[in-house]
Amino acid sequence: MDTRNPAGGPAPRETLGTSTTVPPVLTAAGPRHAVLDLSGLTGSQHRGSACAFCDRPVSNDNAVDLGERRDADGVRIFPRAHPECVEAER
């Protein structure tokens, strides 16, 4: 089974808690990470229909999949974000 994520780094670990690391994007300086606070996400952000950072709607055309997670209650969530929001959080 391949344990690498599409960005080329190790697969993100499933985390229970209020924050977790967004899968890395490789840059010339190495991987960069953004921290996503899971505690304040709305239902739309949990489902991935709204950006996990700015809460504006995302579409399949412009969404960055942040990977399936589990919130503090163990509920599976599927956050996504705009590419520019992910870069701003790094």
Image (cartoon, rainbow, N blue to C red):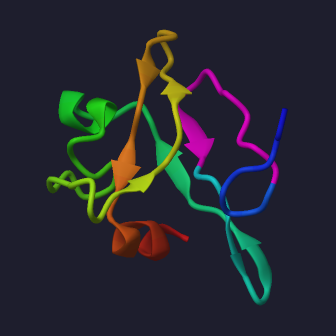
Q: Is residue 14 above or below residue 21?
A: above
Q: Is residue 16 magenta?
A: yes
**Which residues are drawn in magenta?**
10-21
Indicate yes or no whether the magenta region holds residue 67. no
Relative to 62, 56 lies left or right: left
- Compared to residue 84, the image places residue 68 above or below, namely above
Give the vertical position of 14 relative to 63 (above or below): above
Of the pair 54 and 63, the residue shown nearer to us: 63
Give the number of callouts.
0
The C terminus lies in which quarter of the figure? bottom right
Locate residue 4, reporting x and y percent: 79, 49
**Majority secondary structure of the magenta segment?**
loop
Tell me residue 48's x, y (percent). Answer: 30, 39
| x 15%, y 56%: residue | 56
- Left-right relation of 1 to 52: right
Q: Residue most toward the bottom?
A: 28
Give x and y (percent) for residue 5: 71, 51
Residue at the far front: name it: 1
Task: Depth check: give the residue in front, 64 or 35.
Answer: 64
Quarter of the image with the N terminus is: top right
What residue occupies the far left of the structure in this picture? 57
Indicate the quadrant where residue 45 lies. top left
Q: Is residue 71 left or right of residue 31?
A: left
Residue 3, percent from left and from top: 82, 40
> In the picture shown, does residue 66 fall above or below 61?
above
Quadrant assignment, res 14? top right
Q: Residue at x 82, y 40 (%)?
A: 2
Residue 8, by quadrant, is: bottom right
Q: Residue at x 15, y 53 (%)?
A: 57
